[in-house]
Image (cartoon, rainbow, N blue to C red):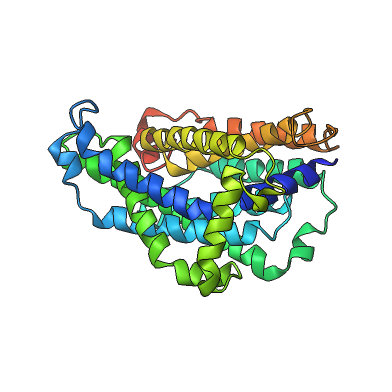
Amino acid sequence: MKIVGRWKWWWRQRSRWFSGSEIECCTNWRLFLSSITPSFLPSLLLSDEMLSMPKAPFLLVGLLEALAAATGMAAGAILSGASIPILSQTFLVWQILLSFIFLGRRYRVNQLLGCFLVAIGVIITVASGSSGHSLKDAGIFWSILMIISFLLQAADTVLKEIIFKNAAERLKGGSVDLFVVNSYGSAFQALFICILLPFLSKLWGIPFIQLPNYLRDGAACFLNIGTLSNGCDGAPLLPILFILVNMGYNISLLHLLKISSAVVSCLASTFSVPISVYVFTLPLPYLGVASSLPAGFVVGAIILVMGLLIYAWTPKVTSSGGSSSSSTTS
């Protein structure tokens, strides 16, 4: 089985596991997170100032995350496995543009070149193992919808960076806990997912009147019970493991966003693409016969690493020009 085939199997299997049940599981889990925040106030050392922060930014975070998840799931179920990582490179472009507009951040030439090389490296790594017609076969609508999804995700991360910066000023040099940002954002995301269910069902091609049956079938697949569990291989262990790993991954990126910037967090996440490609070559359960690495894997990975090093490289500046570099990001 080719790597692209394995990637596509994973996306389709993920959609089948979480179809319907994702709404229930995601909503319940996010409401649980938001409800226990005050209960763990002493143990998490959360201050009243943290919990009394303005909720409007978190409301917008929840809306952006809900729309990004909805559009991403709809497009991801149609697009091929190879086209998704390629389209995801627009995420980095959106972040640079949004941080330039809303944060007033200026980037050095080496940073822009590094971002460009990272995107090229990912595209070479993934496209070398595809047929070359994956984007054309899926149709322009679903490709644009996926790009919109990454625009919403980029806006979400830039907004979180703004929240962290404003919190540092509001808390007089302190910082807001990651749990506060994640909990409030998750609560509002669950709220908007419920509100947008009629729109989401139409986007997913499901009549709204059939949505209860869809939720029931999705829960049966997630739990791997009943006669509707055919094709739900690995459930419920694999989807639960996916949720746990995904939570750890997102929390790590959120922490990196807090201590650096949205663009740095995005660059770090792109390094997972060649790692994922390599993992798909291993003889893992449920994935069939192990496949070989695509021809351009090594070249793409080298270009990606070079891009990261060029972005991180800080040119020496003279003492007289030190103040001129304060407006750039590291």
Q: Please, which residue is most extreme toward the left here?
A: 48
Residue 280 spot, x, y in % from top left: 75, 34
Front residue of 240/136: it is 240
Position of 163 relative to 314 (above/below):
below
Residue 104 spot, x, y in % from top left: 37, 52
Q: Residue at x 65, y 31 (%)?
A: 305
Q: Quadrant of residue 233?
A: top right
Q: Is residue 264 left or right of residue 134?
A: left
Front residue of 220/311: it is 220
Q: Please, which residue is most extreme toward the top here?
A: 43
Q: Residue at x 69, y 51 (%)?
A: 12
Q: Is residue 294 left or right of residue 179?
A: right
Q: Quadrant of residue 310?
A: top right
Front residue of 22/146: it is 22
Q: Is residue 199 left or right of residue 122?
A: left
Quarter of the picture containing the C terminus is top left
Quarter of the picture containing the N terminus is top right
Position of 184 relative to 295 (above/below):
below
Q: Is residue 19 left or right of residue 77?
A: left
Whether residue 174 is visible: no
Residue 171 spot, x, y in % from top left: 17, 38
Whether residue 198 is visible: yes
Q: Residue at x 18, y 27 (%)?
A: 42
Position of 157 relative to 321 (above/below):
below
Q: Residue at x 36, y 51 (%)?
A: 159
Counting the numbered discs, the total is: 0
Front residue of 313/21: it is 21
Residue 297 spot, x, y in % from top left: 78, 35
